Image (spheres, grey):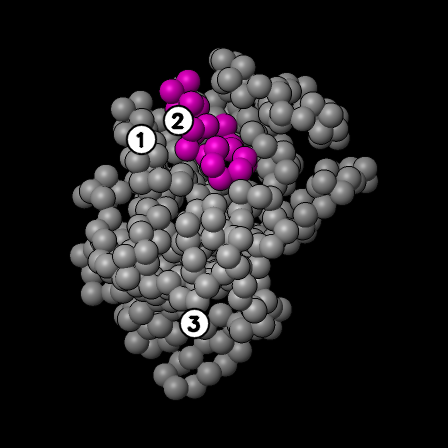
Amino acid sequence: MTHKKLNIAIIGLGFGAEFIPIYQKHPGANMYAICQRNEEKLNEIGDAFGIEKRYTDYEELLKDPDIDAVHINTPIQAHAEQSLQALRAGKHVACTVPMATTVDECRQIVEETEKSGLTYMMMETVIYSREFLFVKEMYEKGEMGKLQFLRASHQQEMAGWPGYWEGLPPMHYATHCVGPVLALAKGQAEYVSCFGSGRIDENLIEKYGSPFAIETCHIKLKDSDLSAEVTRSLFNTARQYRESFDAYGSEKSFEWTLIEHEDPVIHTGETPKRVKVPDYAHLLPKEIASFTTEGVYDSDDNQHLSFIQGAGHGGSHPHLVHEFVTALQEGRAPYPDARQSANITCVGILAHESAMKGGAIIPLPEFTLSS
């Protein structure tokens, strides 16, 4: 265990700016450097948060010997290469989802962490949301009885997002629904079978060759009698935005709200009851506890629109930071570590492959499975 403050560098300052004040206030971290190709935006954020070390070139940042870890928040196509570059430069890595866009990229990251002894953590928000922490606590206390089945969905409309999203296969960005069903059961996916359904606009199909409006995947958990089902949609499907999971136990079951801002339901036997999900700031150091419920802005009154993105994702951001920092300080693996992140990510990649093959059963590669 080390009590040294870790020098953190954040790469990508759109969503990434959300994490700056959390690292600044975390007792185990020093918000050391930021990196953004757009120099004007880099300086705007650097000035607002008082960060002196600024880079427009990621490779130059990686040469800085004082950086202990990088937190990557760039577009998804860059995640794997930037993670590998950092690991090869001797830096620990936290990376927003997904880990990578191909199975081989996931394999390379796992191999690099095991060769170097460095830490990789995929910053999956749902498994640190207050809803997940609530259900996890209920399950670990034995209140749910035996877990019998898990289900999750992530539905959104991506029209108008940056061009690289257009026509993306739904399951290629599935970690928000795969993560909770594996994490609650403390399990790993062994094999998947997925069906595509419906059809998106013809002009959207061209980029990735994926026709489906919705993809629905069944996951068989390794060394378990459990299976799970996850559903994902990105285009041409009428549905309010939803990141959800349901957990069915022998004694109690949890079902996510159908409409945002309503209360979820706990079923005890056959009796349903709406419940208020509590916040879990008490699990955090007092210095960052407030970030579960309030917007993540600069800490003065000098607020800028680029920072006003709210404390979304179920209050998960400070929990993610705390898990990453404390894992490094304690010399332990974070959750999810490289293999677990690969397992979660490869479920989605292989689920789409299964859908293109009419629901064929596809096993997860061995490198994603822990012994």
Of residue 155 and residue 236, the one placed in the foreground of this image is 236
Circle 3 residue: 254
Q: Main secondary structure of the magenta part?
A: helix
- For image coordinates 67% across by 26% down, the residue present is 38
Separation of residues labelled 1 and 2 (CA atoms): 8 Å
Distance in Å between CA atoms under marks 3 and 1: 37 Å
- Residue under the image location 61 percent in, 41 percent down: 15
Q: Position of residue 42 (x, y in %)?
A: 68, 26
Residue 131 vertical position relative to residue 205 in the rendered view, above or below: below
Furthest residue in direction bottom, as rendered: 270
Amino acid type at image mark 2:
Leu
> Which residue carries the number 1 mark?
108
Q: Is 108 left, or right, of 212 in this rendering?
A: left
Which residue is at a point 41% across and 50% down the rendered structure image? 209
Cα separation, mark 3 vs mark 2, equals 38 Å
Image vertical order of residue 261 relative to residue 312, above or below: below
Q: Are marks 3 and 2 in contact (CB under 8 Å)?
A: no
Q: Where's residue 349, x and y in %?
A: 35, 48
Q: Which mark is residue 84?
A: 2
Q: Percent position (x, y) of residue 331?
A: 36, 31
Discs 3, 1 touching: Cβ within 8 Å: no
370 in relation to 216, above or below? above
The picture quadrant where one finds residue 34 is: top right
* Amino acid of disc 3: Phe
Tell me where residue 218 appears, x and y as whole percent.
30, 63
In the image, the segment drawn in magenta is: 70-89
Q: Are marks 1 and 2 in contact (CB under 8 Å)?
A: yes
Whether residue 321 appears in magenta in the rendering, the answer is: no
Question: Closest to the observer: 282 or 34?
Answer: 34
